[in-house]
Image (spheres, coloured by chain):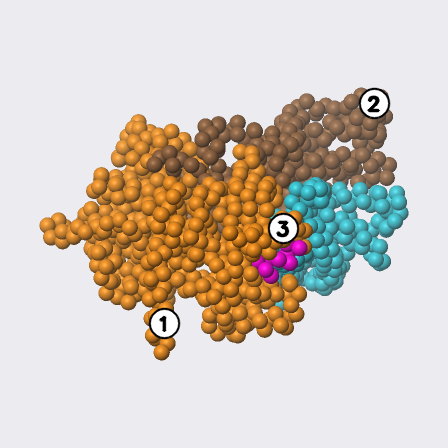
Amino acid sequence: MSSFIGRRSLSSGISLIGLIVLIFFLSRLTGDPTGLYLPLDASLEARDNFRVVHGLNDPLIQQFGRYVADILQLDFGESIRKARPALEVVLEAFPWTLWLAAVTLFCVTIAAIVIGSLAAFNVGGPFDRLSGMLSLAAASAPDFWIAILGIFLFSVNLGWVPTSGTGTVWHWVLPVSVLFIRPFGLIMQVVRGSMINALSSAYVKTARAKGVKERSIIFVHALRNAMLPVVTVIGDQAAGMLNGAVVVETIFGFPGIGKLMIDSILQRDFTVVLAAIMVTALAIFLMNLLIDLLYAVLDPRIRY
Amino acid sequence: MIASTLKCARSPAEALAPPRHPSVAMLKMLWADKFALAAAIFLLIALFCAIFGPSLMEEAATKLNLRDRNAPPFDTERGWMFVLGADSLGRSILARILVASQNTLLIAAASVAFAMLVGGTLGLIAGYSGRRVSDTIMRLADVIMSFPSLLLAVIVLYMLEPSILNLVFVLAITRIPIYLRTTRAEVLEIRERMFIQAAQVMGASSARIILRHMLPIVIPTLVTIGTLDFAFVMLAESSLSFLGIGIQPPEITWGLMIAQGRAYLNQAWWLAFWPGVAIILTTMSLNLLSGWLRIALDPLQRWRLEMGGNNNAN
Amino acid sequence: MQTETAHVLEVKDLAVEFHTVQGRVKAVRDVSFYLDRGETLAILGESGSGKSVSASAIMNLIDSPPGYITQGSITYRGQDLLGMTGAERRRINGCKIAMIFQDPLAHLNPVYPVGWQIAELMRAHGVEKATASARALELMERVGLPNAKARFDAYPHQFSGGQRQRLMIAMALGLEPDILIADEPTTALDVTVQAQILELLQKLQAETGMGLLLITHDLGVVADIADRVVVMNSGEIVEAGTTREVFKHPRHAYTQKLIAAAPGKGALHAVEPSQDGSAPLLEVENVVKYYGGLKALKGASFTLMPGETIAIVGESGSGKSTLARTLLRLEEPTEGRALYKGRDLFALSPKELFDMRREIQMVFQDPTQSLNPRMRVEQLISEAWAIHRDLLPRAQWSDRVAELLLQVGLLPEHAQRYPHQFSGGQRQRIAIARALAMSPELIICDEAVSALDVSIQAQVIALLDELRRTFNLSYIFIAHDLPVVRDFADRVIVMQNGEIVEMGTVEQIFNRPQQAYTRDLLAAGLEADPDIQSARRAERAAHAALSAV
């Protein structure tokens, strides 16, 4: 077990190092790094000054060493926009995204499993067809389009919920709903497919021969076996959301990682972008580990 | 003895049916699934627009007409060009959607093709070669995969210039791991199958085993995923363009049209609405077609479509 | 003559239809049989005969769609099962009529502990949780699982194949059902394990007095434990009667053919291959193969003469397949030499190995898997010449394919079809044609007939034998079962746990086995003759009684 976590940490560490190297070279080799760190209208003097202070005139290898050393000390530099340590800014935004992702995924998982299982139980029936079309439409919808139509309809015209910002529970309704749609469509289809497989399996036949009730066949025998692929997809979706639901957060003015990252990019606040990347990479690593552990809980054949 | 063994346990009639030309069989199976048929027809129309739209509609799409600013849809007075309304500069939305289809579909198609080619090749190598090569390739995929594609694209486009070529490049890079992993997993599985060993026993070279025995099985899977992925890449490009770091005006894509329409949502909802409909119809068609392909390209599942209307259990 | 209601289970005029590509197909027609407590009825049939469908109908396990019961009745103690609601059927399933299946690994839920699964049957019928668990443990001990208490919470994958079938049996016995339906209960098991499971079933039947409905394709199993037998062919019952009657005096042509096809009845190859004169074709010297710490093959040596057939027989894990794969260089040996015409197969350069591939070919166990599903028969067979360019000019390929197809008993027009359009036996013929395309001198058959029905098995073996005479081939024939090789092999090698236990002419091995393991293997193999089987059982019982004293 611990050796598994060790191995996973090692391989994730390698991935992370790869990412760090990639970002460094992309930021140094694709032009003037002061262009990344400083505002667009910074004067030549300011740029020269920045170069000297941050050693951008030093040999590349030296710069790389310093860059890595700083990252290892979790020192990503100052945010230009906020004039505060970049890490602090990022850690402030992170819980918002975490909560948004958690609430949405919770709803998605419950809805997808229940509806997907019921659809799989009566393949080709009216419920299956209806939910199939719905999930297909949901999986095909561009979320930013749904978001602005949602604002137009429910906030502007009907005035049911606020257009953007945070504060009350009502502020969460639209972002969660919009974020819900695509993962729901995808996960429901995976649940359905996986449940169809599980329900046609030999052990379900055994359960029927034993006289086990249908409800228990679906939710006890088939569901747990069908969960493995579902957990994988949920993990993928969770990773996407942890990185900030960029589009949705931007549209709804939700102060999470995604909005922070886009704002920082548009205003060329590179230190914050870097810090955000590292924090989310770490979060994703932890989440993947959790998913692997969940596999082992769900399926006794998987042991690390 | 021959007569007695001719009896085919699974499907005698099938065994005796003369072999049909594959494309005829495919068309028949497409006919059997009406949803997939509609999707295929829609995609053909979209493809036609993407190829000929700009040359036919360029003028209508760029002609400013301030009198028709934000003209509402379904107004027959202005002629069929304005059936979907006009945008904030009085340009026909229909014409603009048709013109934008070229960029939208081209970017997605190029990205998917590039990602499929690179990912598929690397996957074949990773699956067939020894542990060390395989591990190196997989680590590379992990680096890319540890980031959701949209964010990676945002960061790279921030550092590079947002041009069509860069956009294609970035989107392709973010999708390579999908093809790589699928191909590798498939190859690892096929490698253990007995017909590969049978080929080895006959003395077949690695190249022959990969090209003749593995590729024909991997390609249908890749095509199926590619269809699905095409929809994903299209949405990703739309999102990037929507956020302002994808395609830059005066080039247009459907995503950019939605972004531009957002500001006028209160006065003219149709500016953002119609391009969204174009996106959703295209992605839905791709999803439907992908589902159909998954069945049609699998010799063991194909009968569901060949049975005609009775294909409930897919 | 008994009245209808006197039978515990009675199936009358049952017809089941399936909706398929070809429209409606009648899987089962006019099937009638009955079963009482304490007796064993076997339904004997090959694949596609409808024998399993009949059992599924009793348990309400037919998926509808695509399958529908169109006619007939199934009564349990006078109650009409087909007229019952789903809930009522459920109360009978598991409680009054229980069922065990062929592949226990697939039929046990992989994610729940076995004890829980055994107890579930009782809980589903209203037994309290604690009582059910206690009884489940009792049952695990009763079916002979060692250390039952400690393994109560273990998962199915942690048991061996035989143990899993014991678990299934324990599960089925939970509520002491009147009827136990056993669908191919021993098919995937080694012969020695099969004997144990059959013995267990008989013992439990004697103790509980249940009726046993045994569904099988194996004549030996029927001969061993069935009182009565119903023979099915393409959805219909062709013959019914007591086992002895049917086996000794089969009336229907199909039954006669089936019984005649049972292996192990023909004359033994008496010819002692000349050890002098000609040089050996293959000399295997101390071949060893380790997978890490697993010693799959601990040193095998034997000699094969030109035109000779050597059978290598052993149960799973004996190393017989590893040996074959190593000889073909599909695995690299850890140690040893294999001299083919005096040259070491393990020391060949890639070029030499490539040339050697022409002379040694292989026929695999499962033709469904060994033929590329996306290639036509013509492509499959002519691949040999595509790889070895100088073998045959392209212009002659299709003529030669036609010729080969005829030689293996297929038709030239089959060349344009795909493998899935053929039956299992036909596919194996294609695989043999592919091997012959190289004009090899030695063919290694790895369980080449194990996946086939008995009557097809006999045909394929006859084909191989005929080809040997025509082309003066040598065979290494790998099998898990002795009877199959009896009338085919010249010499037999018996393997166990990676070692050769005994080697000798087929006459020596079958009539004068020297080693205890060979004798066990022979004893465990089931003869398709109820008299022989009951004599053997009596012998075993006497032996057991003796050793118990």
Residue plotted at (54% across, 64% down): C173
Q: What type is the residue that disc 3 sits on?
A: Asp
Figure check: A56 above or below C27: below
Q: Position of residue C243 (x, y in %)?
A: 40, 53
Query: Which amino acid lies under the numbered mark 1 shown in the image of this protein?
Result: Ala
Q: Which residue is mark 3?
A: C80
Quadrant of image for the N terminus of chain A: bottom right
Q: Which chain is orange?
A: C
Q: Circle 2 sits in a helix, a strand or a loop, which is it?
A: helix
In percent of the image, x 69 and y 55: which residue is there? A109
Q: Which residues are magenta?
A: C88-98
Q: CA distance from mark 2 to mark 3?
A: 69 Å
Q: Is residue B180 left or right of residue A175?
A: left
Q: Nearer the viewer, mark 3 or mark 1?
A: 3
Tag in front: 2 or 3: 3
C500 left or right of A62 in image = left
Examine the rendered structure and indicate whether residue B78 appears above or below residue B287: above
Pointer 2 chain = B
Residue carrying label 1: C544
* Chain letter corresponding to the colour brown: B
- Residue at mark 2: B76
Report in which chain the residue with disc 1 lies: C
Q: Classify residue C142 as left or right of residue A43.
A: left
SS assignment at label 1: helix
Question: Can residue C305 be seen by looking at this rendering?
Answer: yes
